[in-house]
Image: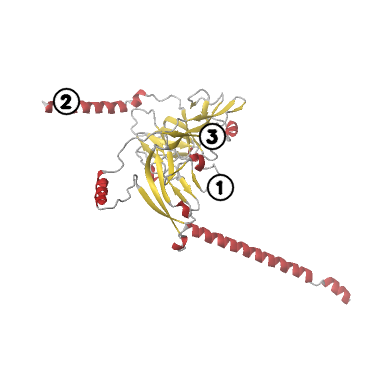
Amino acid sequence: MRLAHTTVLLCTWVSLQAFEIVEKENIFQRTPCPAFLMFDNAAYLADMSFELPCHCKPEDVSTVVWYYQKHLGSSHTVVLTDFDGRLLTEAAHVRAGSSMLVRFSIRMFSLLVFRAQSEDSGLYFCGTRKGDYFYAYDVDIQSHEGMVATFKDKGQEPLPDEYYGSLHVFTTFWEWTPCDRCGVHGEQWRLGLCYLQNPGLSPRYLKTLPDVVSCGSRAVPRKLRVKTRYHTPELLIKSCLVSCEKRTQVQKGVLTIYNYVSKLGSRPWLPQVPIQFHQQRLGHGLIISCPGARPEHAVAWDKDHQPLYRTQYLKGVNRSMRVFIDHGNHLHIRFTQLSDRGIYYCWRQGLRIAGFRLGVTSRRRYPASLSDPETRTAVELTLVAYLLITAIFVTIHICRCCCYSFCHCPNFSTHTLLQL
């Protein structure tokens, strides 16, 4: 009897799975492609990763090809595919500043772009190898250069809206992130991007609200885009306090070793999170990244037991900052000092997930080598300075020789006349 019940359950589960697969395949049948190609407007902050789904395609098309154009009708079109629709890229292997051809992936007909840059702004088309387009996006990647940070706890207010006749420029804020720490005072923030409202924008660009698009949209004429260049993205920050959820900190195997060593009379230091050790040369810069974190995540940093709050350590708060957190949630240490030694803990989405034990060593332990970029830079600067001083020295002596020759050269015409 149990065998019969098990068989019925398995058949039911398989049928449900088949029904789910059929439903996923029929999504494209239920979503007809527009007769006239439209552009769906989307805005993101630089260094973020985003996904562009291909919402519609003909039933007889099994693979899609993604295309990119900087401007509509441009003669230069970039093909973002391997023509099989299965090109995969791991986000962990993507670095900032890499070419867009390295920072994209195609999964289930959707285009994924990792660590997008301002140069990636433009038009993205989902189509076939022959160049037939089904769906398109108008993507605006806004730079975080000049980004304004607003601290609510200090009574600061976001940037006011701007009006230029019928043009209305304003900031649209995302939802608040979760608190970046638990059990202690933390911070949470919400990102604001630049948007505008103006009648008469191109009807080919889909808008969430009437006549509203992001400031960098291709629907915005150049004369209007110039007026929005000073309305930069914003970061609204406030303090928070939440309790920590109970969870197992260490594995059973580690606890067994810990209890055994404790019985021998010594209690070893057992970290609650994975710790990575790093030796840094004195006076050199260092950038620490939080594992698995993205710019849209709530990320926090602590040095030992001292929280590094954004109200004090966010990039741009003080121009002379040596230790700061950038808008991509990376911790920067410029000109490392001996006082920077310690453990730097990383919080992600309210959980402390990793630590970095930083040791600072004297530079005399490391012999100079031309493979070191800083050594090469110092040699280049020395050679440039030497060549400049040599050029000045030679120029001065040439000028002195010329002056000496002209001043002491005998006047032959006068001397000849006196002899006559």
Q: Residues within 10 Å of mark 3 (few under 14, many from 20)?
A: few
Q: Residues within 10 Å of mark 2 (few under 14, many from 20)?
A: few
Q: Are marks 2 and 1 in contact (CB under 8 Å)?
A: no
Q: Residue furthest left?
A: 1
Q: Quadrant of the C terminus?
A: bottom right
Q: Are marks 2 and 3 in contact (CB under 8 Å)?
A: no
Above or below, comparing residue 129 to residue 92 in the picture: above
Q: Disc 2 residue type?
A: Val
Disc sitting over residue 154 in the figure: 3
**Label 2 or label 3, whichever comes before in sequence order:** 2
Tell which tag, 2 or 3, sits nearer the viewer: 3
Judged left or right of residue 26, residue 191 is: right
Write down the quadrant of residue 222 in the picture. top right
Between 139 and 149, the one lying in front of the other is 149
Kindly identify the residue that appears in the image at 56 percent across and 62 percent down.
Answer: 383
The residue that mark 2 highlights is 8
Question: Does the image show residue 297?
Answer: no
Q: Disc 1 residue type?
A: Ser
State the CA–CA distance, disc 2 to disc 3.
Answer: 64 Å
Kindly identify the residue that appears in the image at 38 percent across and 24 percent down.
Answer: 32
State the CA–CA distance, disc 3 to disc 1.
Answer: 21 Å
The residue that mark 1 highlights is 320
